[in-house]
Amino acid sequence: MTDPRHAQPRTPPSEAPYLREVKSYVLRAGRMGPGQARAFEQHGPRFLLNYTPGPFDATAAFGRSAPLVLEIGFGMGGATAHIAAVRPGDNFLCCEVHEPGVGALLKLVGEQGLENIRILRHDAVEVLNHMLGEASLDGVHIFFPDPWHKSRHHKRRLIQPAFASQLARHLKPGGYLHLATDWEPYAHQMLEVLSAEPLLQNTAEPGGNGFVPQPAYRPLTKFENRGLKLGHGVWDLVFRRA
């Protein structure tokens, strides 16, 4: 994984058992630029949601009824804005705690006139636990979570059996979970964890390596594109709830 992207906010750690207080992120220092700060002022009142324990009313939050996709950790928001633009019929509930990233996505929302994004500046684990009911999501996106390269830190990786089980329960039957990483050892751990979850089924071609071609809606980030030019790989996994 490229060093510049490591400096961006990631979706990171989670540990079992889930009874412990865990977080879906690592809070990293960052400074908002003036454009991001203006976006907070101009677009925050409309597109930022308050974390409130209790059932989430997606129809009220988005002003319409549409398939609901949860994105966990959107970094600087470029991929999120792209996906929302090419899939206007879906609603995207996006969790990120890194304020410069939130400001960057709000700026893109304003520039592109996107109406189908809402942002929660809160830990996605608590959002799942206290706002979103089971079988309430049509999809979940987790792109390039922190790989925690060192072996002693692998327990901090977000994709662990307990979290995979929680995500699966929150998906509607037929709902999908899309993960992507450019760290091959983590890709294989993700594949192992998701394949062991009885509620999930891999959409990859039988007899293949378990990974899928990059879905058309997920764009290449500039760091991903740079890595591909250097011969680095990217692995996408798409599982569906049975």
Image: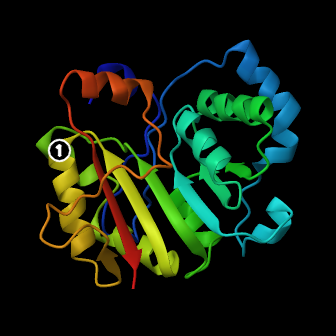
Element on which disc 1 rests: helix
Q: How many marks?
A: 1
Q: Residue at x 70, y 68 (%)?
A: 53
Residue 87 seen from this side = yes
Q: Nearer the viewer, residue 164 or 155?
A: 164
In the rendered view, tell whether residue 25 sits above or below residue 129.
above
Q: Quadrant of the C terminus?
A: bottom left
Protein image colouring? rainbow
Q: Quadrant of residue 68?
A: bottom right
Q: Nearer the viewer, residue 48 or 216?
A: 216
Q: Quadrant of the N terminus?
A: top left
Q: Residue furthest top?
A: 34
Q: Residue at x 71, y 50 (%)?
A: 117
In the rendered view, tell whether residue 126 sits above or below residue 33.
below
Residue 2 seen from this side = no
Circle 1 residue: 184
Q: Residue at x 18, y 66 (%)?
A: 192
